[in-house]
Amino acid sequence: MSAPRGLAVRRILVAMLLGVAVYGGFAVWRGLGKMGDELARFQWWAFAAACGLAFGNYLVRWLRWEFYLARLQIKGVGRMDSLLTFLSGFVLTVTPGKVGEVFKSLVLFETHGVPVARTAPIVVAERATDVIGVVVLIVAGSLGFSGGLLWAGLGAAAVLVLLVVVSSRGLSTALIGLLERLPGPFRKLGPKLHEAYDSLATLVHPANLLVPTLLSIAAWSLECTALWVILRGFGQQTSLGLSTFFYATSTLAGALVPVPGGLGVTETSLQGQLQELGHVGATTATAAMILVRFATLWFAVLVGFLALSALKRRHAGLLASAPGDEASPAHAGG
């Protein structure tokens, strides 16, 4: 097993153990017997539908990835390789802030020779437009409903700070200069950060924000609908608007707190809102929360591993060397 894949597996195992502890704690708290009764009456077609909606989310976000590759004038990457590369990033989706998704930049380098520094800023642009999209959904879901806009304000503020820094070449160059003056490995990062900044500045230019933001809104509305479908599977009549509000605010809360996959934060927020604001029974709310997290978070990890395996079959040398090795990529693309 290569070092990158070994690192991915270790992180996934740690996150899985944390997830088991979180979900097990919720289940014990609500009573294992009651939880079993709730799951026994659950209509499992709803879980399958939720997984389908989550996969739709991934496909829409892949279209955004394609948009970014085109804007950076990265050519020679076939549609299937592009899709599998994007999905492979979900292997590390349970890293804090999903920064592990930069893994797909490493994959693209090894398969098509595209420099990591050139594509890694796509992850930052993706997170920025994700936050914008989720904030829009929070506002839409909160119409006629008080509360929750605090998270929308925090998310919007984070995106605003990012856009201000990136839009100012002088400010960004000054920050990179500070890093270059630090001892150790930071000094060597300077040239790569300058290259990454050029790509990021292109991606967050106002002309390149509209389409990715619209795609983000469409993508995350699918996962919000997944929560609504699962609640229907329990016989709950929670409206789509409230389901959107609950899922979007919980997702944003998990994204803003630097814990793997938002574990613990997203679950607590979602379960609490379902029970206190949606008037869903405590045990049902916990069961719905666990199922929607399996359909969205852990399903994504599974899809990532399957995509990486398929890509490995297409490119036998993928991840064969340890990080930092100067092995030639599989192809010399641009």
Image: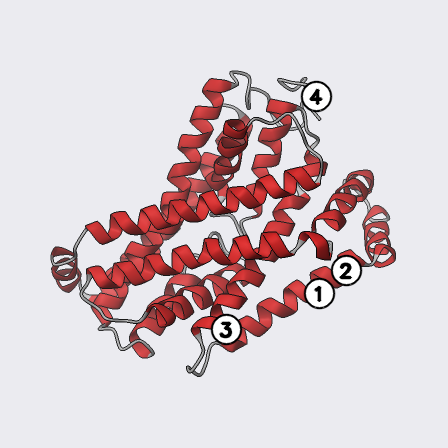
> Residue at horizontal 39%, vertical 60%?
224
Label 1 crowd bin: few (<14), some (14–19), many (20+), radius 10 Å = few
Residue 236, horizontal then vertical, whole percent: 21, 68
Q: Residue at x 78, y 39 (%)?
A: 192
Q: From the viewer's perspective, tell me whether residue 152 is left or right of residue 166.
A: left
Q: Quadrant of residue 223?
A: bottom left
Q: Is residue 98 above or below residue 185?
A: below
- Where in the figure is residue 95, as x and y percent of width and height? 51, 48
Name the residue beneath numbered marker 2: 165
Reading the image, the residue beneath label 3 is 139
For marks 2 and 4 on the same chain, the one whose residue lies earlier in the sequence:
2
Could you tell me which residue is drawn at 40 percent across and 31 percent down? 306
Give the foreground label among 2 and 4. 2
Amino acid type at circle 1 is: Val
Is residue 10 visible to us here? yes
The span from disc 1 to disc 4 (Cα, nearest Å) is 36 Å
Q: Nearer the viewer, mark 3 or mark 2?
A: 3
